[in-house]
Amino acid sequence: MPESGPSSVAPRPRRRKVTPKERSRRKRELRDFWLMLLLLALSGNPVFASPEPNRILVPILAVILGARVLARRKRSKKYRMVPVMAFFAFLVAVQAVHFMSLPLFTLVGLFCRLAVAYELVVLISNFAGTYIRAMLALAILSMVFFFTNLAGAAVGLDIAGATQRFALPAATNTGSWTILVHSFSEDPLDATRNAGMFWEPGAFAGYLCLALVFLCLLRQRFSKRAFYMRFAILSGCLLTTQSTMGYVAFALIILLAGLSARQVKLRAKAGPIVAAASVLVAFAVLFANQSFMLPKIEQSVLQSTTQYGSWQADRLGSLIFDFNYISARPLTGWGISDDTRLALDPDLGGAALTGRGNGMSDFAAKFGIPALLLWIYCFYRVLLARVPGRAILAVTGTLVILIMLNDECFLNYPLFLSFFFLANLRGARSFRPLRQPAALQTCPD
């Protein structure tokens, strides 16, 4: 018979005590997570990003966050605010002299958005990693609403319509509404598309693409299982947006995922690239067979070439519309005031019809081609800092976001403006990644 007694009983494993340093790290990560959600809300949630609340909320946040930055014990010398502010101040001064006009309140809004972008870059310690976590949470939340709505429709329940009584006063697309954490639409073309908490599915697709780019570039920090799990969730959510530009950008993201697999042996290195190419071909076939794709493209081309209706708001139409402005003032642009921004088309009152469809051409028309090229270069350097020595990954990631800039005016919002400050342009040494203990090289599942 086996012996009995205290010696035969296996001792309970003791719960590992959380050290003060680890507790502080968790607290910092949680704070960064909420700050990133704030940045995303200011950059796309209709409740926060709509013109009316934005005019009040952004200046208030600029002051509050600015006080928080100044109160930090350790001042950041990595990110510089003055050069970017001076660059935009120069453009504004040139425009003011040329047009003999200074739209004070509009310019205050611009510089407040830049200030908020800078302050959040300073306050969020791990920008790219925190962005991935925030978008992963928003993707999961959005798919809960999206698939619940589809399941309800399958059995005859209008779940989306039932939420309309809880709609918040916010500027959304016609026939759309938001309950803060999710946006719905009664438009037949958008009712089965996932907009998440953003103003429309195309905007959600752009922010998901940015998360996928960051995820691919930070691949070595994740275990294999953790990377594929996050990639599958974000990719699946992107497909539910049914965004034309999102699908085009996703083709490059698949290639980026293959290129990001760092392997030592040539044979092992070629495997992920071949697999990515195979998935890319399969996705191209799926993309071509989507029933909503061809009609959208045909309508865009027809509306833009015939200049029918609100053709200036179309992706292709706004590019044609903005080209006249860019060619007339390519260096310093026309500014953000409606009086100057629409100077060549005085019959168009307000900004409702212009620049809404193509964020890249809109930004170039407002601030000139050099400003757009500077942003592209800054964004490229931000990506290169995550993968030093692998320029092909940074170039591919930049191309993904340039595709999405043709879909929405992301550069009107603090998140994309933050890349002006996030890029450290003082030299290659500043881009060397921080050395971490071996235990922290991969993220837990």
Image (cartoon, grey):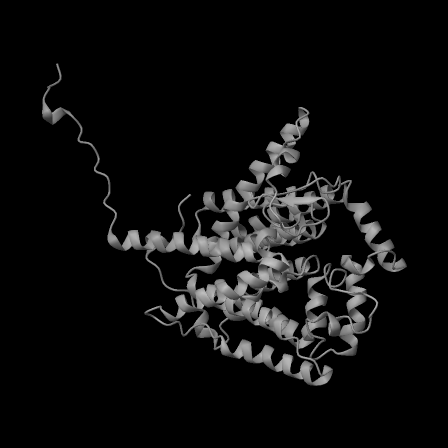
Quarter that holds the C terminus: top left
Q: Is residue 33 above or below residue 152?
A: below
**In the image: residue 333, left or right of residue 324:** left
The x and y percentages for residue 296 are: 79, 48
Q: Examine the image and state in which quarter residue 325 appears.
A: bottom right
Q: Is residue 258 visible?
A: no
Q: Examine the image and state in which quarter residue 102 appears.
A: bottom right
The x and y percentages for residue 405 are: 67, 60
**In the image: residue 227, left or right of residue 292:** left
Q: Is residue 184 visible?
A: yes
The x and y percentages for residue 404 are: 66, 57
Outermost residue toward the right? 306
Q: Which of the pair 140/104 is nearer the observer?
A: 104
Quarter that holds the N terminus: top left
Outermost residue toward the bottom? 97
Q: Is residue 272 above or below residue 188?
A: below
Residue found at x 72% / y 60%: 356
Q: Which of the pair 267/291 is nearer the observer?
A: 291
Q: Is residue 339 above or below residue 403?
A: below
Q: Examine the image and state in which quarter residue 153 appears.
A: top right
Residue found at x 67% / y 61%: 409
Residue found at x 34% / y 51%: 26
The x and y percentages for residue 72 are: 35, 68
Q: How many marks?
A: 0
